[in-house]
Amino acid sequence: MPDPHSEHGVELRKIIHVDMDAFFAAVEQRDHPELRGQPVIVGGDPAGRGVVATCSYEARRFGIHSAMTAARARSLCPQAVFVRPRMDAYREASRQVMGILRCYTPLVEPLSLDEAFLDVTAATADGILAVQIAREIRARIERETGLTASAGVSYNKLLAKLASDWRKPNGLFVVPPEHGLAFLAPLPVGKLHGVGPATVKKLSAMGIHTVLDLRNASRQVLIAQLGKAGLWFYDVARGIDRRPVQTSRPRKSVGYERTFPQNLEDPKVMLSTLRQMAGQVSARLQALGLAGRTVSIKARFPDFETVTRAHSDAQAIWRTEAIIACLPGLLAKAVPAGLPMHASVRLLGVTVSGLVNVEAVSPEAGQMNLLEEPVDLR
């Protein structure tokens, strides 16, 4: 009989994924009570050329999301309140939250300022339930920071992260081992982490629309159609995720990429899209207090050929305009004009690598202002 405490030979763990609710916007609403209940957008100037870093749930109801141009956000919600980011306030709130998490286990893996995995397997050895820990963590976060968090509890990272999104905002959801396969089965494959529109389309062509469809596909078929990724899909469909919670994981790069429903053919549209991505990458760098030395872009063509082109600079890069300055030359190298096979792209991405803490670059640079300089995103 299979061991109920193991997952295909791997001992089951007790994993919690904690995800703060609309973090930057929530900090602004906490610190400025007049903003509570209002559609708040944190980011650049809508009258200029900024982008949305994040927004409150009130704003999300209008279809606003991160990386959208601020001007577009204003057109969708004219009554929105735009707020310039205060990274020091967000970092301080994050320090408080992470400090609370580490009171329950040393095995905390921050993914960003506003979310983290916890392995509480050892903490539950004396009979305390992981859901009790998650419930207490959420209560302490709200009591000590004035902010709300959602949490997911399960036996691996894959399911814990899916669960944390199930009852957002300010929710808690548990997926126990005996319910893992049933929980996954009806989910669209696009809900799986890292599965973009292009992969969804490819899976759809194979007759795979849900995780259950994926589970019914053989390992051989998945590998034949998807290469090495087929092994990952085979395991995920069965709720298998062996990744441990890693307390220290040096970040090597910060990037953002998109697969498009329809291939892009106009170089001007490609460049405009890359500029918007640059704003998203800059926002993430500044949230993490990091700067880099190398900017690279990725382009994937209709035949799935993928090329990357990079530019390194002696000066630290984190501001949007510094990233954007590299893009025209990199795009010209990655997508040369006049080559029919490269007339369109299905995916574009921007990455900054060679990362260092911004304070190591310049003590004066430690106070970074998200999207500080207005940038042309048209």
Image: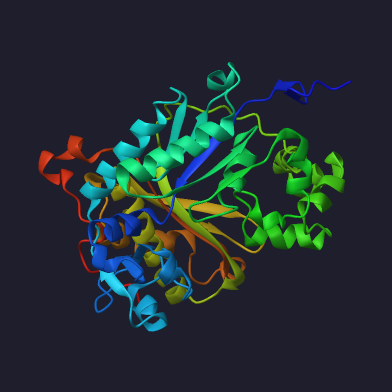
The quadrant of the picture occupied by the C terminus is bottom left
Q: Is residue 276 left or right of residue 161?
A: left
Q: Is residue 348 above or below residue 231?
A: below
Q: Residue at x 57, y 35 (%)?
A: 131
| Residue 122 lies in quadrant | top right
Residue with the most extreme top position: 126
Q: Position of residue 280 (x, y in %)?
A: 38, 58
Q: Is residue 349 left or right of residue 181?
A: left
Q: Position of residue 83 (x, y in %)?
A: 25, 66
Would you say residue 97 is visible in this rendering?
Answer: yes
Residue with the most extreme left position: 364
The quadrant of the picture occupied by the N terminus is top right
Q: Nearer the viewer, residue 130 or 193?
A: 130
Q: Residue at x 43, y 50 (%)?
A: 255
| Residue 292 lies in quadrant | top left
Q: Nearer the viewer, residue 267 or 201?
A: 201
Q: Position of residue 216 (x, y in %)?
A: 87, 47
